[in-house]
């Protein structure tokens, strides 16, 4: 009797079409960065990767879909965006020995809900003509009155600068962070405006001498005939916090709470954290791979080496709202 039942069950299974092996992704990162990786993964595993490229609304979409979501994984940049998805209870822990071996501790959630894949460093772009080597070496320096009227930056409330302020807050507390923000504000050559590249343009145009920006924009500017001259007017300086490292942020991945294909999703996460995949991903956007033994591409390496701050990025995410409040209290953009 039991045997018959088993045969019947097997027959039913055989009659049903084989479910395709697949994994589904919601990505805030662009197709040109993601497609080379997903193609290589499909080639190696036979697992199809379907990617929906979103510009906004990922959280709302996942909330609306609830348990019926097709999404297994989300790709995004900036710890604040990863943390927002985690805070909205839209992820689940996912871990393996491979992930742990490939992702250094400061770039992963202690509770395994997100994993970093690449980093970008928040650096100083310094005028080749007007800033001597060694003139700026720390983030604390940016608040020194010697820079009065010489600094350009994008809005203080932008996620990139909120993350940097969160790191200052981590080391100096509220009073110290407020002093730092006031000091930097007093040194600004103009009201915060534009994106990171616009600050380098302003150095090229002679409006300021140093600017705060992410490393990968150097590569992006060099790709563009008009912007290359802006890029060529500056040196890259990797500042550190006094007695600590250089501030970095990440691109990362998280598994959704109701992932329909969690095993395939974990395989894709493992592939993405592999040194080879990280190098492909990092090179496509002039970022840094983080797996032990992986290397940035030659152009990125030519900008110099640095020691990344070892604070866990979750600490910065936790400081985010306090940092934003301070930025508003000092009226940084005003
Ligand atoms: Fe950016």
Image (tube, grey):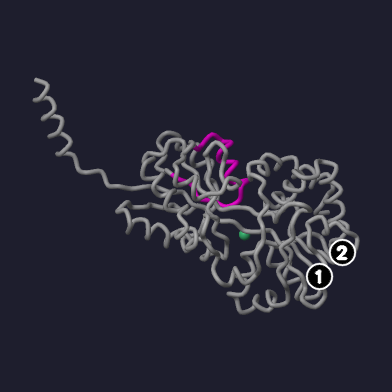
Q: Counting other residues with Cα less than 10 Å from the Cα at mark 2, is it few (<14), some (14-19), or many (20 or more)?
A: many
The answer to which quarter of the image holds residue 248 is bottom right
- Camera-nearest residue between 333 and 324: 324
Chain-order first, disc 2 or disc 1: 2
Q: Residue at 87% of width from left, 48% of height from top? A: 179
Q: Residue at 75% of width from left, 49% of height from top? A: 165
Provide the secondary structure element on which disc 2 rests.
helix
Task: Identify the image quadrant of the N terminus.
Answer: top left
Distance between the Cα atoms at labels 2 and 1?
Answer: 8 Å
- Residue 324 in picture, x, y percent from top left: 74, 44
Residue 234 is left or right of residue 49, and the answer is right
- Please say if 25 is above or below 38: above
- Asked if disc 1 is less than 8 Å from ligand 1, the answer is no
Q: As drawn, which residue projects farthest toward the front?
A: 293
- Asked if disc 2 is less than 8 Å from ligand 1, the answer is no
Provide the secondary structure element on which disc 1 rests.
loop
Highlighted magenta segment, given as a residue range: 73-91
Q: Residue at 71% of width from left, 49% of height from top? A: 162
Q: Counting other residues with Cα less than 10 Å from the Cα at mark 1, is it few (<14), some (14-19), or many (20 or more)?
A: many
Residue under pointer 1: 209
Q: Is residue 220 visible?
A: no
Residue under pointer 2: 147
- Please say if 305 is above or below 162: below
The answer to which quarter of the image holds residue 155 is bottom right
Residue 236 is left or right of residue 262, and the answer is right
- Residue 59 in picture, x, y percent from top left: 54, 42
Residue 101 is left or right of residue 329, and the answer is left
Q: Is residue 271 magenta?
A: no
Q: Are marks 2 and 1 in contact (CB under 8 Å)?
A: yes
Task: Identify the image quadrant of the C terminus.
Answer: bottom right
Marking on residue 72:
none
């Amino acid at each position: 009797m039991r045997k018959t039942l088993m045969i019947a069950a097997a027959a039913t299974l055989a009659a049903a079409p084989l479910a395709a092996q697949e994994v589904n992704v919601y990505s805030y990162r662009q197709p040109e960065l993601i497609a080379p990786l997903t193609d290589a993964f499909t080639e190696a595993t036979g697992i199809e990767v379907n990617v929906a490229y979103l510009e906004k609304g990922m959280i709302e979409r996942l909330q609306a879909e609830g348990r019926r979501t097709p999404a297994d994984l989300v790709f995004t940049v900036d710890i604040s965006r990863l943390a927002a998805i985690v805070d909205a209870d839209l992820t689940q822990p996912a871990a393996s020995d491979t992930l742990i071996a490939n992702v250094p501790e400061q770039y992963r959630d202690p509770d395994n809900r997100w994993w970093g894949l690449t980093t970008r460093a928040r650096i100083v772009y310094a005028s080749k003509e007007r800033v001597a080597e060694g003139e700026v070496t720390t983030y604390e320096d940016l608040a020194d009155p010697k820079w009065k009227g010489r600094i350009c930056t994008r809005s203080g409330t932008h996620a990139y600068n909120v993350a940097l302020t969160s790191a200052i807050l981590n080391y100096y507390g509220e009073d110290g962070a407020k002093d730092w923000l006031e000091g930097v504000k007093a040194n600004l050559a103009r009201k915060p405006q534009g994106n990171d590249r616009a600050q380098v343009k302003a150095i090229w145009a002679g409006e300021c001498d140093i600017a705060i920006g992410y490393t990968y924009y150097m590569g992006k500017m060099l790709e563009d005939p008009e912007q290359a001259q802006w890029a060529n007017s500056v040196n890259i300086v990797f500042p550190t916090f006094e007695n600590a490292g250089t501030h970095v942020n990440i691109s990362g991945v998280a598994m959704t709470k109701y992932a329909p294909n969690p095993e395939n999703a974990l395989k894709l996460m493992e592939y993405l954290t592999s040194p080879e995949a990280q190098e492909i991903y990092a090179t496509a956007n002039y970022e840094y791979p983080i797996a032990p033994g992986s290397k940035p591409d030659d152009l990125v390496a030519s900008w110099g080496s640095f020691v990344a701050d070892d604070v866990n990025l979750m600490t910065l995410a936790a400081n985010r709202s306090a940092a934003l409040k301070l930025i508003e209290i000092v009226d940084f953009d005003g």
